[in-house]
Amino acid sequence: MGNFKDNRSGGGRNFGRRSFGGDRGGDREMHSAVCSNCGKNCEVPFEPTGSKPVYCFDCFKKMGGGRDSNRFQDRGPRRDDSRPQNNEQLDAINRKVDKILELLTKVPTPVKEKKEIKIPIKKIPPTKE
């Protein structure tokens, strides 16, 4: 049997798909760079293009980078006052749905049959003048 612990062939539960942020160990190609903050030589797991700053491990951590950072700081705080508004909107929707269901499930009242009344028409003979 083969060595099932060596999972570099793309097998396992990922089925050959690239892992984004999962296993960070193993044979990862590192590239030389100079930290934009402190000027130290460092290695990074991507090829620097020069269009964005590159930070060494220490500076990256100091700036709040990595797994422990709040990844969505640019989204702003969540507002607690949005809940009552949502409840009011849901209540309004529920009232409308209840009205629709009431109309759809209403038992139709039977309509009385209309009887046709026939009135005989007498022909009046024309008068001679």
Image: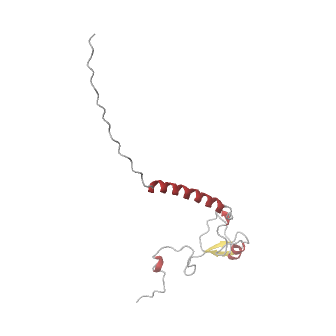
97 and 34: which is toward the camera:
97
Quarter of the figure that contains the N terminus: bottom left
3 and 51: which is toward the camera:
3
Residue 24 placement (x, y as % from top left) = 58, 78
Tell how many labels.
0
Residue 31 placement (x, y as % from top left) = 60, 74
Q: Residue furthest top?
A: 129
Q: Residue furthest right?
A: 38
Q: Give the vertical position of 91 relative to 46 (above or below).
A: above
Judge from the rendering whether residue 68 lies leftward or rightward of residue 104; answer left or right: right
Is residue 40 in sight in this rendering? no
Quarter of the figure that contains the C terminus: top left
Q: Residue at x 52, y 57 (%)?
A: 98
Is residue 57 in sight in this rendering? yes
Judge from the rendering whether residue 61 lies leftward or rightward of residue 115; answer left or right: right
Q: Residue at x 58, y 56 (%)?
A: 92
Q: Residue at x 42, y 51 (%)?
A: 109
113 and 122: which is toward the camera:
122
Q: Give the vertical position of 115 relative to 34 (above or below).
A: above
Q: Residue at x 32, y 37 (%)?
A: 117
Quadrant position of residue 83? bottom right
Quadrant position of residue 39? bottom right
Q: Give the vertical position of 57 relative to 112 (above or below).
A: below
Judge from the rendering whether residue 89 lies leftward or rightward of residue 105; answer left or right: right
Residue 76 placement (x, y as % from top left) = 68, 63
Query: Looking at the image, what colour scheme do you see?
Result: secondary structure
Residue 43 placement (x, y as % from top left) = 64, 75
113 and 9: which is toward the camera:
113
